[in-house]
Each structure stands twice: as C-alpha cells, then as structure tokens.
Image: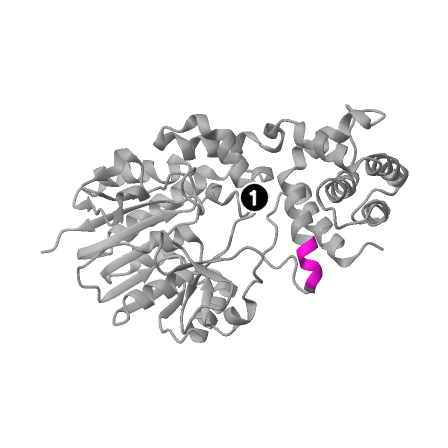
Amino acid sequence: MPTPARLHVAHALHEVFGEKGRVPDIWDRDLGEDAHLAQALLGLCLRRWGRLQAWVKPKLKDPARGVPLGTQVALAMGLVQLAWLPGVSDHAAVNEAVELAATRDLGFVPHKGLVNAILRRAAKDRAGLAAELEALPAALDRTPATERALKAALAPHGAEAGLEELWARLQQPPRPSFRVLTGEPPEGLEPDADLPGCFRLAEEAPFPRPWLEAAQGMVQDRSSQALLAYSWDRPVARILDACAAPGGKTTTLALRHPGAELTALEVHPRRVARLRQTLQQRGLSAQVIQADAAEWLERSDTAFDLILLDAPCSGSGTLQKHPEWPWLVHDDLPRLTGLQRRLLTAAADRLAPGGLLIYAVCSWLPEEGAAHRDWLAEARPGLQPAAVWPADRGAPADAEGGRTAFFRPHPLRWEGEGFQAFAVARAAR
C-alpha cells in the first residue's frame, strides 16, 4: 500500500485530471511532517504535467493510444521523485509508484509491469532524467487558457516579450505573506521592504502555525495587502464587504476603520460559519449575513460609504498558488462576467454620496476588469475614478499625478497574485 502522503497526492491528481476540479484546500490535512513531501510532489506533478506525459509517450508500445489516467498519475509521481526530489530513494520512488498502479481505484492494475519497467530504467540515471525533462519545451505545461492569461497580464505594461520569464516565475511556489494583528511578529517573519505592514516568511523558516492559530496574525497575499492599502480621507461610517469569506479583507477593513459599521455578505453556509469564527477569534465585530450578494444589494436601501466588491472570477491571476489552474475547464467566463457586471451595478447603486467603491478580481483577463471599468464609466457617469493607489501599482497609462485608480501591478516586477481592481467615488452633495 502506498504511503498516505502519496495516496493524498494521487487523489488530488485524479480530482484535477479526472474530474476537472480544483485541489481541495484541506487535501493534505492530517499528514503531519509528510505534508512537506506531499506538497512538493503534487506541486511538481501539476507544474510539469505536460512535459512528464510528453517524456513518457514515445516509450509506450502504442504512443497514439496513450494510457489510462491511473497509469499517467503513477508514472508522473514516480518520475517527479526520481528527477527532482533527491531525498527520496530509488526504491521508494519506483516501488511506491508500482503499488499505486496496482491500486484499483487510483491506478490501472494491468500496467503495473509497464510502470515498473519505465521507472526502473529512469532510475539508472536520475540526473539525466532531470536534464531530459527540463530540456522539453516549457509550453508543454501550458494550455491555451494559460497562454491567454499570461498575455493578458503582460499586455497593459507592453511586456508581451516577457511571457517565458513570467511563466518561469510562476513555476516557483509562492512565498507566504502575513499581517500582524496583535503583538510582535514571530521569529522567521521579515518586514516587506516595499509594503508597510506586510511580513514575509524568511528562507528556511518554519511556517508560523501556532501564531496564526492564536489569532495573533493572518496569512494575506501581498497583492491583497497592497490593494487594501488605499488612500482615502473621507468619513467612513458604513462599510460593505460584498463577498467576504474567508475574512482576510473583512479583517483589514475592520482594523482600518474601527468606528465604522461593517456588513459582510457571504452566500455559502460553511464559509459564513468560517467567517464568523474568524472574526470572533480576532476580536472583531461585523454584521455577517448569509445571502446572495447581488440579490441582497438589489433589494437593499442602505447606502454605504465604502464598498469592497472582491467578485467571483476565473482566478487566472492565482496560477502560482494554484498550479492546477491550467488544467481545469475554463468555459465559465460568460457566466462570470455577467455576474460581475450585475454585482458591480448593484454595488454602485448602493454607494453613498462621497463614498468609495473598490471592485477587484484575482484575474488578469480584461473581460473581468478593464472592460467593466469602461462600461461602468458610461453606465454610471455620476461615478468618477478615484486614484487611491501609488502609480506603480498600475500600468503607465493608468497613472495620473503619481497615483492610479486602476490597480494592476506589473507581473514581472511585482511579487504577488495577479489582481485587477479599480476604484470609483460618488461626488459628495
């Protein structure tokens, strides 16, 4: 029987390539110290899946026919361990993959001998195997949807020639970012030189799980922190976080405007429970409402001085954190952009005079950001762009007077998720 770590990885790969689903957030729960091996193994399988399959194909008796997913998974996991995980022995890499192939629900029993033969040959020259895999074109690991996302990220900055550089950067696991909620940061966290209040995990430092569990700090992506470091000096009495779970941005809003009345919307019951628990653990108060944000906004008559609409989106800007993204089915864009426009319209209509609306998506695709900004300018002429971020947080064309109203950092110069956001304000009466 394969080890629990390898079984968890195999289940996650079947979820992605068999069901076209995302890797669950808690996929590696209860693995203990073996979680490090599982995370490295899964990440490499997902980031190198295309070239792994390309390497195997000519070694098959019938390359045109291919092999079942269970065989693909077993071979990919074995090859990754032999090529890039030197701490794993030849015996463990090969035998565990063979056992996985012999597992009826995750492997393909008739190909047990095939997996054994291919991996034993590969194990004879691990350095050569790694060199062969690395020499294969990086484009094998990208899908058409991925190519389009990368081009969309670079185009506003005139940096289309940097596609391979950007892709190479995104293949490195992201470095976690944190915010301190109470007290001092634990050992191993270093201040971010370019983003006040942001802390990064030092190289080789342990993940500060006890500190997080004590609600003394929180994980928050660098782009999210920069997004919420907006400059705004008008009074804020009522705040709406329209799509609030899991609660990182809600927390930041509560801390930035401690005297304001904060309303947080979330449609999914489990995420609502998690949001309430998170706020309670952090000693923060908000009116948490389980509701569809668009429906709630459309029937509400409350005006808000600050609205954050972090809308559901394709997630194309999270490629680095979610290496399964390239392999998912991306046919949902028309539905998503329709929902985003509906949410944006409803939120804009609930903005009080003198109020600020920030619309954000973790996507690089123009349909989910720039197109909505241009549409809103025509549909709601009473709203004007609000330059609430430093100019270097946007593209050169967005800058005015050292500020920008359109948040989209240069992907080759900015370390953090790919975000698009724009800010608009309603004139005060």
- The image quadrant that residue 394 belongs to is top left
Q: Position of residue 61 (x, y in %)?
A: 85, 25
Residue appearing at x 27%, y 37% in the figure: 375
Residue range of the region highlighted in magenta in the rendering: 33-37
The N terminus: image quadrant: bottom right
Mark 1 neighbour class, 10 Å CA radius: few under 14, some 14 to 19, many 20 or more:
some
Residue appearing at x 25%, y 65% in the figure: 238
332 shown above or below 178: above
Colour theme: one colour
Name the residue nearer the viewer: 320 or 169. Answer: 169
358 shown above or below 118: below
Q: Position of residue 332 (x, y in %)?
A: 49, 39
Magenta-colored stretch includes residue 124: no
Magenta segment, prevailing SS (helix, strand or loop): helix
Q: Is residue 103 visible?
A: no
Return the residue at label 1: 172
Q: Position of residue 220 (x, y in %)?
A: 44, 58
Q: Is residue 115 visible?
A: yes
